Every structure is written in structure tokens, then in C-alpha cells.
Image (cartoon, helix red, strand yellow):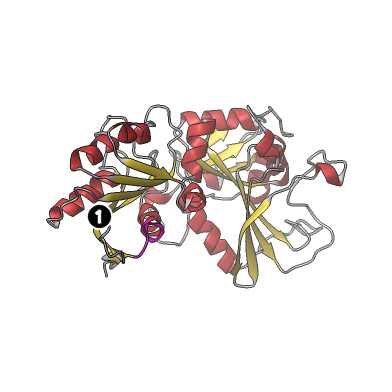
Amino acid sequence: MPIQEPTRVDTVDAAMQLALSLAARGPARDPNPQVGCVLLAPPSGAGGPRRILGSGHHRGAGTPHAEAAALDAARASGADVRGATAVVTLEPCAHSGRTPSCADALLHAGVAEVVYAVADPNPIASGGAARLRAHGVSVSTGTRQVEAESLLRVWLVNVTERRPFVTLKLASTLDGRVAAADGSSQWITSEAARAHAHGRRAEACAILVGTGTQHADDPSLSVRGVAATDASQPLRVVMGLREVDEDAAVRADPELFVHLRTHDPVDALERLQARGVRHVIVEGGPTIAAAFLRAGLVDEIDAYVAPILLGDGASSVASLDVGSLRDANRWTTDSVHPLGVDTLIRLVRGAESPAAHVHGAARVGVAA
């Protein structure tokens, strides 16, 4: 059944919440940001809820931007958008490329006010707010900024740091073990946790492991379940100098297999960036995880924790060269989700995380 959208909202904040939900429908892997827009009728003198004239979201590179989609929807319904308020999750662009400038589209439509959540950091497209103000449009920003930045986090890192966004996936016992003393590791986490991880794989452009993990576990690094399609399959990336066997599971589709013969996370990300990779999930092993953490190149951590204690066995992360608690690698908990008997803890870079202090990441190698 089609999703029924509200016809009125009580506040601009509620309109932004709707715009964010629309934006999330856009393709996660697209090079363009996920953006949503809601057009509100001018406020009445008596106050009260405001009518939604039109709404839309960006469906991917080469398709209309969210503002244009919302304007088209309003026109299709016969609505008059003159004097309207445009509530949009990202600053309207001032650049004309495959699609016209959103700032100009709003100006030509007669929109009187624009409220956006996040400023556009892309120097090619930014400047829409200034252009709108210069033509007498009331412009404000910051509404639901945190939620918008979370939705746009992959794209924001792509633009501001010119590299792929990195998610580090850890799947461990309560005491941080990824294998028992005898090397057994399948399966530490539950079927529910593994199914969730496959959903996350489907959102990423590439899945990366080290040659050690590849030789030990022979993972396929494919998306399984969650209505997986050929289009949802990410690149399967192995990082390290050791050769990957010809019959390895990651070679099942030669077009999706990539062997990065390097020990340097910075070099690895540069090569993936050149391939158009926007989001990579680093899935192990402990040495690779530590290398990306030491280099300050992890943007978020998905920690799947099983209610199991082993005491001995391989740790989820190798040495971080931390000798004192004051030098600990610290993160901020973003969310906690129960997954069957397991728990997913999502952590993001905080003010004290290494990545927050890296300006041009250091080159940190990994062992062969």
C-alpha cells in the first residue's frame, strides 16, 4: 500500500521531521545526498496547522532534486506556492548541472521563506542560502540539524574529507572476543544479529577484510537475505599483500572482487575513492580494525555484542598502542538496539575520539 502522507502539520519542526523521513527514501549508495522537501502554505492570521502544498525527495543522480520534486507535486495538485515556506533537509543548491539550481527554482516559484537543516559544504553547490537572501527570501537554518547530519553522514564525510565513510563492524562476546582459544568463531552472534548485518552490507558500497581473515574464514562478503539483489551486492575487498586463492569465496563474482595490495588504510581508502566507493564496512580482522582506528579513519562502529563470556581467545581489536587510560580510544554511544539475544551498540566519533583530531590522517600500516 502507498504511504499516506499528512496533509497538514502543526509546526515547521514537524514539517522538517516529515522532510527527513522523505529524504531517507532516497538511494543510500548514490553519489548525491539524500534530501527531502516539504512546501507549506503561508501561515494564516489565526495560526493553527499549515497545509502541505507539496513534498518530494531526491531519487538519485540525474533526477529532480527534492525542491523541484516538491514544486512539481504542488503544481500537479493545482496549489499556488507563492508565499510558501520550503522546509528542506539540506541547503538549496546554487549550482546548475544535470538539474537546474534549486535556489533559482524556489525564487522563480515565488517561495517567501526557506528553512533548511544543514548547510551544504560542497563548494560547487553551496551558496543557495545567500542567493535566496539576496533576493528577499527569509532564510533560517538549524532545525533538526542533528538528525539531518546523521542521515547525511556518509555524504558529508565524502565531501569534507574526500574519502569513503568508514563503518567498523565488530561482532564479539561480552568480553570482546571474536574467537575461542581453539579458534572456533561460528557463530558468536545470533541469527538475528547476522541478518541485521546483512542489511547493513546492502547499504554499503564495499565490504573490507584483511588477508588474515580471508585465509582463516574464507568469507563471501556478499549480501544474503534482506531481499538481496545483484544491485545490492557491494564490492568484496581484501586488503593485504598475501595472495587470495583462486577458489576463494570472495572471487565468486570477479567484477565485484578487489584485492588492495597495501597495508596502509589511507592508501586503501584513496583507491576505493577512485572506484567511486562512498561507504565501506571494515569487518576485520583485529589487525585491520586496529590499523583503521589508529589512523583515525573510522567514522562509526557497529558493535554486535553476544551475551557470552570466553575469557581467552582472539580480541576484536589488536593493539592500539594505548599505554594509559587517559589515552584510551573513546567513542560516543549513538544508539542501542536489542537483536534477539544480542545487542547492537552503534558508536560515533566524539570530541575525544582519535578521528576527531585527525586532519589529513596519518599513514598506519598493518602486519602481513
State which quarter of the image contains the N terminus.
bottom left
Mark 1 residue element: loop
**On the image, which quarter does residue 294 sit in?**
top right
Q: Residue at x 35, y 56 (%)?
A: 22
**On the image, which quarter does residue 192 sit in?**
bottom right
How many residues crowd around disc 1 within 10 Å: few (fewer than 14), some, or many (20 or more)? some
Q: Give the farthest residue toward the front.
A: 45
State which quarter of the image contains the C terminus.
top right
Q: Using the rendered image of the protein, determine whether residue 98 is visible from the camera's viewpoint.
A: yes
Q: Using the rendered image of the protein, determine whether residue 261 is visible from the camera's viewpoint.
A: no
Name the one closer to the observer, 316 or 76.
76
Q: Left or right of 210: which side holds 49?
A: left
Q: Position of residue 115 (x, y in %)?
A: 37, 47
Q: Position of residue 80 (x, y in %)?
A: 15, 52
Image vertical order of residue 247 relative to residue 126, above or below: below
Q: Which residues are magenta?
A: 10-15
Q: Left or right of 69: which side holds 114?
A: right
Main SS, magenta region, reads helix
Total number of numbered labels? 1
Name the one closer to the observer, 293 or 147.
147
User: Is residue 203 highlighted in magenta?
Assistant: no
Q: Left or right of 247: which side holds 202?
A: left
Q: Position of residue 182 (x, y in %)?
A: 80, 58
Q: Give the farthest residue toward the bottom.
A: 341
Name the one closer to the observer, 307 or 58.
58
**On the image, which quarter does residue 363 sit in?**
top right
Residue that carries the numbered disc 1 in the rendered image:
42
Q: Residue at x 73, y 59 (%)?
A: 184
- Please state which amino acid type lies under the numbered disc 1: Pro
